[in-house]
Structure formats: structure tokens, C-alpha cells
Image: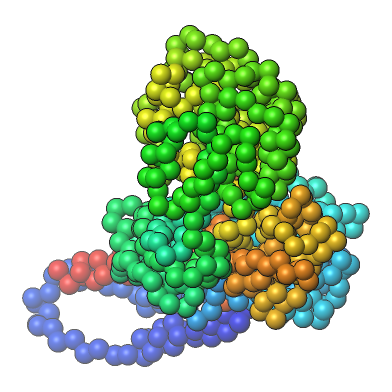
């Protein structure tokens, strides 16, 4: 038999206390005054042997109570599998994600996890593999001292791995190494740890889950996300940033303050009061006075957990969205819609006479395309390749042959003969970026357009057709196609109340704004450190051979990137471990700014209970435990279905009850004697 806490055996010296009390009571004498013997009634006599026997039973129960209590704190166990544990490989995973920064007394959960891991290394023999969310400390088993050094080097990291990926990595490195004892030290967040992750492990690996528990009443207020009311930042105009804050755990006792900073200056603030909700939205207004990149920072004062108190956004401000409006005759509805937003800068042209430089426009809008020619079609094709979006509203008397021969040549779409049957648009694709970021909430009973005439539109498979609004039979009313490096938007009906009420609908003006603003790729960036998130960076000055560098916080590295037309897709934050603003730059002069943040998946601090983990874990025979008061994880060989310390506690309680019984019995007999 061995003990988890052998130092508690020193408390066994307390067994001398009831012995001293027993001997002292035997030596005490008491003088009793009593009346004349003639007044006595049937005195019950007690022999000296009976008195000694009763005192010995009382002494025995007290000794057993103290002995069992000491054993319960020492936690005895039988080490029948000692040989197996000494010869097996021990793998230890330490969760060093940002949720482990939550505090417990003067230490955070990662400090406690490291202490547990060191205790496990010191109590095991053989070799070790040490894992965390970063790269493995070594790819081959190491000795005790190397394992302790590797544990000491583990720090909080923004790197995020799913439990499935972590266990799959451990399984790969432990392959063909025989029996392995795996200790998984984590807080086991409910939104991250899946109890079916055991499918990644083979039968040779015995899993031991060690839960590192923080304060049960912890609370974490954090900035979940933020987005501009319009997809681009306007210079010299009021911009509105919509911020969602949330909290996890216990309800915050005090109200928090949310602040908006732009280039180091406070622009707006709001008091965060959740009331009866777990989240809230605040709209902060601000204005920028110069064009170019702006460093937008949001902060909330939270005293418990700090890694998610700040959200960084890099946005490039411009004065206007430039639109080229092409029409044969003025369309009062399009003109009114474009005048409704002061951020539109409209240039008018007639079909067949387009400006030479189309790259300065965000959107080319045909208000009623009647016919076109090969030269104009070539200009439109080049503009789409340069990243300029094009939108076509057909004319009521459109030349089908001419349009299909020219526009259809570069877009792979064709217009059919007009369908004059009146019908209602029935479907809205809410998941498309044109719609999902457009409205905070789309009404359930929203009125969709009513159409009296439309041109059936057909497209080839490689055009990647997406119907934003469509009829019941599946024909598109408003659709988008990928052409070159931009999008071609097509409405199948003229923008005229004689043919549809689309221009009066809920979507008309917002769709115009979205089509113009979505062509401004590379204007707003906010990514997560340590996550593979590709962002598209325009590259007007360079070619496919120029490479983007990430500069900032003492870093100069070349991230993974892939050229795509006039820009490049860059994995901007996959190799970054610190939050902040970073510059993406090439030798040709192309630059962009990105804001790098911590992952909000770690902000939900609600964790699984140990009983829930035991009951829902998909593999039988594995062990679950919590660190004890001294932060010592117990070896798997010391765990059993009914630990001996519990048996000792129950027996100690039984001895206490037996002592009470003996004392009450003695008291009853004394009362009987004196009556």
C-alpha cells in the first residue's frame, strides 16, 4: 500500500491524545456527599472490571476514528500496476490556450496545469512526450529533466487546435510505441471540447483527463465582433460601427465601459449594461478626417480575463464610392436611389461611349441595356478582370441577338425571349455576402418583388451562378456571376414600374450600395492570431513575382500567399503570435494594414463538469479526475472505481457514531443509578 499524501501520516501522532485523556480520567477522584444510609433506595453497584471494560471500548473507538481520519487525508492506494506504469511511455498534453489565463488566487490555470504536469513527471518513470497547442516539445520520447524543462517553457499561446486535431497528433507520434499513458490537462470548455474526440485514440493509449478548475463564479465580459454599418469607411462623414459584446459565466456585478479609439484618439464610448441578456449591441459613431488606413481599436474594461478585452480593425477610408451610370435615357428611379446616399459619386455616360479608364470606378451600372458592340464588350471584360463590378438592368426593348453575341461572349450568360406572365419572387438567398451583412435582421414576412415581365437568364456551369432573388420555378430574378476578378450582377427585369416593383422594394438601394462597396477589396481587415485566414490584398503595382512581407512588432516574415489576378491571397496571421497592427508590403510599393486579434472561441469560459465528462466520454476504461488541493494530478494506477480514502471516511464516521452511542449509554446508566 502507498499513499498519495504520505505527509498526512504525521498527523497519526494525534492518536496519543485520547490515550492521555483516558489515563487522566482514571486517576481523577470525586467526593460525593450522600445522606444517611436509611434514605438510600436499592443502589445499583458497578464492579471495577465493568467500568474498566466500558472505558476501553470508548478509548478504542476514539483511536480508530483518528486513525481512519488520518488515512482518509493520506489517500491510500494499492500499487498493483506499478511495473506497467514504470515501463510505459507517458504523454502529457497541457492546454495553453488563452482560456487558461483565467485566474485562481494568485495564479492562472496554466500555472496550475504546469505544476500538475511536473508532479506527474516526478512520480512516473520511463520516457515522456510533452504536448501543447504549439508544436510538440520533441518528436521522440525524452527523459525526466528534459520533460521538466519543456513544461517550464510552455506559455499562453493564441494558437488554437481542436481536441480532435490534438489527439490525432498525439496518436501519430505515439504510434508503434506500445502502451502509453496519456494525461490531458485542460479546463475542458463546453464549446470546444467534444466528448466524442476519443475516436482519434487507439486501444494502446490510456486516456487520463485532468480538469484544471478555476473559480466557479468567474465572469468574462468580452468584445465578440464588430462591423461597419456600410462595408467601407467614408472620409469626412459619420461612420457607424456596430459592436456586439457578450459575457460568459456569472453575470457582471458592475457595468462596463466600451470605448472606440481611432489612431490613438478616443472617438466614442458607451456603457455596457446587459440587463437580462447574455449579449448586447451598441452603435458607436465616429468620423475620420483623412484618407488612407485607419487603426480602429475597441476596448472594454473587464477585470477578470483580459485577452479578449480589445478588438483591432484596420480600415482604409475613402471619400466616395465611384459609380459609372450608363443609360440611353434618364431612369428616375436609379437617379433617385443614387442620390439617396451622399457617399455615391456618380459619373454618367451613354452606351457605346464609355471612358477609357474604367478602373477608377467601383461599379459600372447599366440603367437599361438595349444593345452593345464588340469594343464596349471588350472594355467591360477588361474592367471585370481589373476587379470592377458590373450590373446590368435590361431595357424593355433589348436587342437579344446583339447583347447575347457580345456580353455573352465573355460572361457565358444569355437572355431568352421575354416572359410576360405575372409572378412573385419567392426565394431570397440570405447566406450570400450581398444579403447576410446587409441587414441586422431580415423580417420574417418581408415583401419580395412582384414581376410582370422578365428575360429568362441562362448561364454555363463555370460561371458560378448564384441567384440572390429567384422565382418559384428556379429562374433567377437577380443573380450574380463570377467573371474575371469581379462580379457581374444581372437583373432579369427592367428597372421600371411597368415591369416590376423592384425599385420600390426593401432591397433596391441596399443592393446598389453593396455592389459598389464589395468591389473595394482590401479595405477592412481583422483576423485572429495563429489562425489560417486568407485575405485578398490588391496588388496594382506589382506582378506575380513580388512577395508580400508582414512587418510589425519586431517581425519581418513572408507568409504563405497565392497570386490571383490583380491581387494575392495571403495567410496573414497564421504565423503570428502577438496581437496588434501589422503592415503587409511589397518592394513595388503595394501596402495594406491588418488588425490581428485573439480568438474569441476561447472567451466562453463555461466548462464541462467532471460528472458530465465521465458519463458522456465515448470510450470506456479511461480515467477522469481533478487536481487535488496541492495541484497534484493522481497517477492512473492510483485511481479506482471506489477510492480507499472514501472507505476510510465512511468508517471514521461510523466510529464517531459508535462513540456517541457508548457515551449516551453510560449517561443513561448513571441516571438510572441516581434515581
Q: Left or right? Give the position of 428 relative to 674.
A: right
Q: Left or right? Give the position of 148 relative to 312.
A: right
Q: Left or right? Give the position of 463 relative to 291.
A: right
| Residue drawn at x 58%, y 20% as measured from the top left | 398
Above or below, comparing residue 439 to residue 296 in the picture: above
As drawn, which residue projects farthest toward the top?
421
Above or below, comparing residue 39 to residue 13 in the picture: above
Percent position of residue 298, x then y: 45, 68
Asked where in the image residue 251 lies, by quadrant, the reply is bottom left
Above or below, comparing residue 102 to residue 162 in the picture: below
Asked where in the image residue 363 lies, by quadrant, the reply is top right
Residue 79 in view (yes/no): no
Label count reads 0
Percent position of residue 664, x then y: 29, 67
Asked where in the image residue 433 lies, by quadrant, the reply is top right
Out of 183 and 489, give the one closest to the viewer. Answer: 489
Percent position of residue 55, x then y: 40, 76
Percent position of residue 482, x then y: 68, 37
Amino acid at each position: 500500500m502507498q499513499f498519495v499524501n504520505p505527509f498526512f501520516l504525521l498527523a497519526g501522532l494525534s492518536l496519543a491524545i485520547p490515550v492521555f485523556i483516558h489515563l487522566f480520567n482514571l486517576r481523577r477522584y470525586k467526593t460525593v456527599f450522600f445522606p444517611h444510609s436509611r434514605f438510600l433506595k436499592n443502589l445499583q453497584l458497578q464492579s471495577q472490571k465493568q467500568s474498566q471494560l466500558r472505558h476501553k471500548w470508548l478509548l478504542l473507538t476514539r483511536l480508530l476514528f483518528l486513525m481512519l481520519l488520518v488515512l482518509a487525508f493520506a489517500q491510500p492506494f494499492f500499487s498493483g500496476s506499478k511495473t506497467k506504469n514504470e515501463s510505459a511511455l507517458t504523454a502529457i498534453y497541457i492546454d495553453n490556450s488563452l482560456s487558461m489565463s483565467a485566474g485562481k488566487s494568485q495564479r492562472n490555470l496554466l500555472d496550475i496545469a504546469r505544476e500538475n504536469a511536473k508532479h506527474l513527471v516526478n512520480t512516473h518513470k520511463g520516457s515522456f512526450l510533452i504536448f501543447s497547442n504549439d508544436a510538440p516539445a520533441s518528436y521522440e520520447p525524452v527523459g525526466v529533466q528534459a520533460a521538466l524543462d519543456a513544461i517550464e517553457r510552455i506559455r499562453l499561446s493564441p494558437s488554437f487546435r481542436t481536441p480532435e486535431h490534438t489527439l490525432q497528433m498525439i496518436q501519430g507520434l505515439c504510434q508503434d510505441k506500445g502502451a502509453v499513458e496519456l494525461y490531458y490537462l485542460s479546463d475542458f470548455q463546453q464549446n470546444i471540447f467534444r466528448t466524442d474526440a476519443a475516436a482519434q485514440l487507439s486501444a494502446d493509449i490510456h486516456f487520463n483527463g485532468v480538469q484544471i478548475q478555476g473559480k466557479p463564479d468567474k465572469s468574462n465580459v468580452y468584445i465578440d465582433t464588430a462591423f461597419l454599418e456600410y462595408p467601407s469607411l467614408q472620409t469626412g462623414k459619420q461612420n457607424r460601427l456596430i459592436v456586439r459584446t457578450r459575457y460568459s459565466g456569472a453575470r457582471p456585478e458592475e457595468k462596463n465601459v466600451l470605448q472606440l479609439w481611432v489612431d490613438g484618439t478616443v472617438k466614442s464610448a458607451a456603457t455596457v449594461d446587459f440587463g437580462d441578456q447574455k449579449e448586447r449591441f451598441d452603435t458607436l459613431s465616429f468620423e475620420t478626417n483623412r484618407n488612407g488606413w485607419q487603426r480602429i481599436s475597441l476596448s472594454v474594461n473587464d477585470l477578470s480575463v483580459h485577452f479578449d478585452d480589445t478588438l483591432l480593425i484596420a480600415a482604409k477610408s475613402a471619400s466616395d464610392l465611384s459609380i459609372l451610370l450608363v443609360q440611353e435615357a434618364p431612369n428616375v428611379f436609379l437617379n433617385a436611389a443614387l442620390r439617396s446616399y451622399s457617399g455615391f459619386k456618380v459619373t454618367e455616360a451613354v452606351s457605346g461611349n464609355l471612358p477609357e479608364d474604367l478602373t477608377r470606378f467601383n461599379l459600372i451600372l447599366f440603367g437599361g441595356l438595349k444593345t452593345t458592340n464588340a469594343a464596349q464588350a471588350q472594355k467591360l471584360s477588361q474592367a471585370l478582370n481589373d476587379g470592377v463590378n458590373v450590373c446590368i438592368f435590361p431595357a424593355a426593348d433589348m436587342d437579344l441577338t446583339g447583347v447575347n453575341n457580345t456580353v455573352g461572349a465573355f460572361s457565358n450568360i444569355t437572355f431568352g425571349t421575354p416572359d410576360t406572365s405575372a409572378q412573385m419572387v419567392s426565394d431570397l438567398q440570405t447566406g450570400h455576402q450581398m444579403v447576410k451583412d446587409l441587414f441586422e435582421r431580415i423580417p420574417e414576412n418581408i415583401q419580395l418583388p412582384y414581376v410582370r415581365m422578365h428575360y429568362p437568364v441562362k448561364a454555363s456551369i463555370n460561371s458560378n451562378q448564384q441567384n440572390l432573388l429567384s422565382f418559384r420555378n428556379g429562374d433567377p430574378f437577380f443573380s450574380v456571376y463570377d467573371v474575371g476578378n469581379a462580379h457581374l450582377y444581372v437583373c432579369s427585369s427592367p428597372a421600371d414600374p411597368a415591369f416590376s416593383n423592384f425599385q420600390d422594394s426593401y432591397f433596391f438601394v441596399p443592393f446598389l450600395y453593396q455592389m459598389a462597396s464589395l468591389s473595394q477589396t482590401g479595405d477592412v481587415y481583422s483576423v485572429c492570431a495563429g489562425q489560417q485566414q486568407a485575405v485578398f490584398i490588391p496588388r496594382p503595382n506589382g506582378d506575380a513575382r513580388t512577395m508580400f512581407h508582414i512587418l510589425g512588432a519586431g517581425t519581418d516574415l513572408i507568409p504563405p500567399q497565392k497570386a490571383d489576378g490583380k491581387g494575392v491571397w495571403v495567410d496573414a496571421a497564421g504565423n503570428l503570435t502577438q496581437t496588434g497592427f501589422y503592415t503587409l508590403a511589397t518592394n513595388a510599393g503595394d501596402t495594406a494594414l491588418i488588425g490581428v486579434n485573439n480568438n474569441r472561441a476561447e472567451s466562453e469560459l463555461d466548462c464541462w463538469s467532471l460528472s458530465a465528462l465521465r458519463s458522456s466520454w465515448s470510450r470506456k476504461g479511461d480515467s477522469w479526475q481533478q487536481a487535488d488541493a496541492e495541484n497534484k494530478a493522481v497517477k492512473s494506477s492510483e485511481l479506482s472505481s471506489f477510492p480507499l480514502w472514501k472507505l476510510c471516511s465512511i468508517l471514521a464516521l461510523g466510529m464517531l457514531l459508535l462513540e456517541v452511542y457508548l457515551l449516551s449509554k453510560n449517561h443513561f446508566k448513571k441516571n438510572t443509578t441516581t434515581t
